[in-house]
Amino acid sequence: MTISEYLDSVKERLLLDPLVNNFEILRERTTSIDGYLRVKALLSDGGLLEFAEYIQHNVRNVKRLRRKVLTKPRTGGRKKIEKSIFDSVKG
């Protein structure tokens, strides 16, 4: 999987997840060896999810080096939201 494919899979997951009403890409950068994505999403319960990921490509796959998440869910809790959105995206 390339850096671009990984970031596309994150965005696709956001589009398909019923917990996400809409989202905005605040910043995106992609090179052949690394990438960065920062997103702000409005959740279906009226809460807010903001996250950023920095990833690098190594010989075998894409490796997430850093993820920073800020959530303000109205219901359901942070772990449920993170599990729903991030667990299905594999590098």
Image (spheres, rainbow, N blue to C red):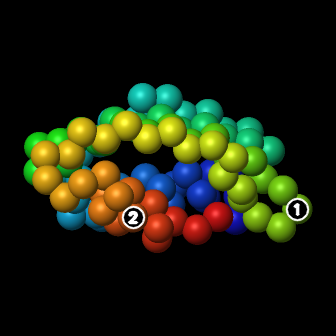
Residue 15: horizontal and vertical position, in percent?
31, 57
Secondary element type, mark 1? loop
Residue at x-position 58% and y-position 68% = 90
Q: Tell me how far mark 2 sits from mark 1, CA to CA.
A: 27 Å
Tell me which residue sits at (42%, 29%) in the image: 26
> Is disc 2 placed on a helix, strand or loop?
helix
Which part of the image, by quadrant, shows the N terminus? Answer: bottom right
Observer able to see residue 80: yes
Q: Horizontally, is 31 left or right of 9 in the view?
A: right
Q: Position of residue 80 (x, y in %)?
A: 30, 62
Q: Nearer the viewer, residue 5 or 57?
A: 57
Residue position marked by numbered label 1 in the rendering? 59
Q: Which residue is mark 2?
A: 83
Answer with left or right where residue 50 lies relative to residue 60.
left
- Residue 14 lies, in percent from the top left, at 35, 55
In the foreground, 14 or 5: 14
